[in-house]
Image (cartoon, helix red, strand yellow):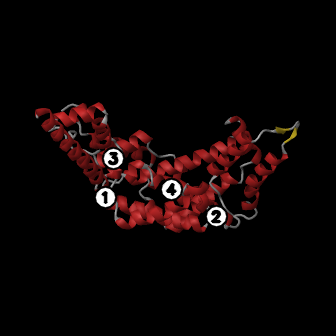
Amino acid sequence: MSYLQLDQRVFIKLFFHLRIFIIFLGKTFNILNFKSTDLAEQMTYLDYQLFIRLDTVELILWVQEQNEDKSYNLTKFTEHFNNMSFWCRTQILQQDDSKEREKYMTKFIKIMKFLRKYNNFNSYLAILSALDSAPIRRLEWHKNIIDNLKEYCSLIDSSSSFRAYRQALNESGSPCIPYVGLILQDLTFVHIGNSDIYHGKINFAKRWQQFNILDNLRRFRKENYHFKRREDIISFFDGFSLYLSEDELWQLSESIKPRCSNYPKTCIIKDRPFLYNVMNQHGVNNMIFKVIENPRCNIVTGRYVQKILKSIKNTIEKMNRMHLIMKKKNTN
């Protein structure tokens, strides 16, 4: 048997575990070996070391120029957020057994609980973005995990301009680590929607809006976290440098649960040539096939797919009755 004939899932896991072995040689512990509160404290410790280096000038320059060289600390802070998110996804998807994956999901949810307690919205949202990512969300999870995830997702509901998150942020005291992405979004809206000069004078209204947004950074850094550095946990994190790419995560996810392989690529109207041709002219069949073959369609399987198919079936029956009526008229 050639290497090309190897099962895809075996190859992916072999490749991943080889990377694990090389980087984590001599390390036998995993995230389940540590207390959730300790992990949350060390995540907050690392976040805060980067957060206190952020300068308001960097944020303004990034909105104006998006130059990484002029916003070095902001770039590092953003990279840290992304690395943590992909690290969490990798930690979950690397587990072969479904029960182990659920243990990791539950562990991260517990960590988020303590991150919220410590007002660390940055790591909170990094982990939440991982747990709610498509490669993980499409898998089958216990109802308790789904319900808990929905509750945590409510914090970043985008309705009313992230009202729930903004309210939680306003109620938080110092120290606090906000999600910088939303701060950059607010600054961008102010920058684009207001000119620097108004009637030949400096637009102080724009400057006042920018000040109100950035003043939270000063308020949240009035006090410091008093967490002690834990070398064993920091070493375990390893800068969150060990993670798979988006494509690799999708491959691993699909090796666990193949994409919609249980759904036929034929449609229920194939046995009715007239209706098939009519609906094909309007692109309806292509739409159905795209829904069925979409790599993310596992998210809407079950009752949602049944609802779609039922609606399509009702439409087909109506069109079939119309066709019979037309056929009778033509015969007469």
Q: Amino acid at mark 4?
A: Ile
Q: Would you place residue 122 above or below residue 68 in this image?
A: below
What is the C-alpha distance between the residues marked 2 and 4? 20 Å
Residue 25: tell me if it is visible: no
Q: Quadrant of the C terminus?
A: top left
At a point 68% along the width and 44% down the height, the residue shown is: 189
Pick whichever of labels 3 and 2 is earlier in the sequence: 2
Q: Of the numbered discs in the image, which one, if any, rests on residue 98?
A: 1
At a point 28% along the width and 31% down the height, the residue shown is: 281
Find residue 102 and report its image quarter.
bottom left
User: 29 or 8, which is in the foreground?
Assistant: 8
Residue 38: tell me if it is visible: yes
Q: Of the numbered discs in the image, which one, if any, rests on residue 210?
A: none
Find residue 41 and report its image quarter.
bottom right
Find residue 142 and report its image quarter.
bottom left
Q: Of the numbered discs in the image, which one, if any, rests on residue 297?
A: 3
Q: Residues within 10 Å of mark 1 (few under 14, many from 20)?
A: some
Give the x, y percent position of residue 67: 68, 35
At a point 47% along the width and 52% down the height, the residue shown is: 130
Q: Amino acid at mark 1?
A: Ser
Find numbered disc 3 in the image and state the secondary structure of the residue it sits on: helix
